[in-house]
Amino acid sequence: MASNNSDFLNLVNASGFLFQLKVEQEISASSASHGKSILAREHRWVDLDSGHEGFIDLIVTAGTKGKIVIECKRVRDAEWVFLILQDAQSTKSARVLWTKRFDENRQGAAWDEFGLDPDSLDAEFCIVRGQGENQQPMLERLSAILLRSVEALANEELGYERSVGRSSLRFYFPVIVTTATLQACRVQSSEIDLMSGELQSANFEEVPFIRFTKSMPSCLTSSHTPFQLSDAARENKRTVFVVNAGYLVPFLSGRWEFSVPAWGDPWPWDFP
């Protein structure tokens, strides 16, 4: 029997569900310090356009209008290395999803750029050990599924009864919580050898969380109409927050409030 119990325990420990349960417990136990709470676990989502479906690990409140959509990713003895330009600074910029009911017959949803606390470094490239050159990068695969689930959740909530106007605004923040150590690799482009595509040296720093922002597949678009290729490249970007589990509580303790648009620009939902 002891041998069987050991086999069962190994089976349980091999799954990622224990990590998900611990992340949920950590959020609930620290709720007094960051003001967030669990809304749902294993929430089923369905993409009505593609037919894809799955389960959101955790949905967490972020103020009265926001939801943090969490994907838990346990990995063993892993480091995720993000390439950061040498002179890059922490940023508050993030491209996240919003929805709004304008009136009884009209509603909107779009991915747009906001100034959002907490700030962090922002990366477009992530390198994971053991990842082959012919494979789709792991973080891109995770992020694509997460973004799809976020849009499905937003679409589901647009179908619920809610008031119209500013009070109907909702925001969705995609987050990956992982056991991997997050390393920022500071890169000076001029020091990359053109013939080998390699660096002779680089500076590395461990970071508690990071923005992963790049052009990633999604059904919903930006509220801005691009007029040229550079505009389209910018507006197609989406932000996924990647958080080391050991820093989850400080991450959640950020203000999670938007900065007012600069130069008197309108909010995205105020565009015609």
Image: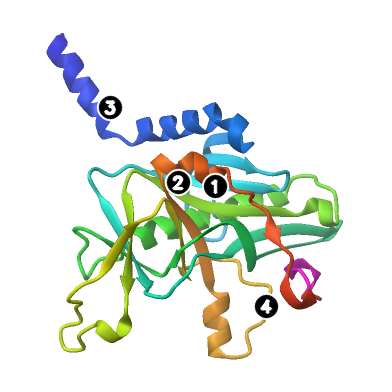
Element assignment for label 4: loop
Nearer the observer, 18 or 186: 186
Task: Name the residue beneath numbered marker 2.
Answer: 71
195 vs 210, left or right, is left
Q: Nearer the viewer, residue 218 or 268?
A: 268
Q: Write down the residue under mark 4.
A: 224
Name the residue beneath numbered marker 3: 12
Q: Which residues are magenta?
A: 266-270
- Which comes before the other along the chain, label 4 or label 3? 3
Q: Give the Cα distance between marks 2 and 3.
A: 19 Å
Asked whether residue 228 is in view, the answer is yes
Instruction: Answer with left or right where residue 210 lies relative to residue 188.
Output: right
Q: Determine the image quadrant of residue 108.
A: bottom right
Magenta stretch holds residue 166: no
**Looking at the image, do the residues carrying marks 1 and 2 touch, with CB atoms under 8 Å apart?**
yes
Whole-percent x, y for residue 28 in the image: 55, 29
Q: Nearer the viewer, residue 102 or 235?
A: 235
Label 2: which secondary element: strand
Q: In the image, what residue type sits under mark 2?
A: Glu
Task: Mark 1 or mark 4: name the one nearer the start of the chain.
Answer: 1
What residue appears at the point 53 percent right and 89 percent down from the top-left corner?
229
Give the spatial CA distance, label 4 vs label 3: 47 Å
The kind of residue on which mark 4 rests is His
The earlier-in-sequence mark between 1 and 3 is 3
Specify which label sits upstream in the sequence, 2 or 3.
3
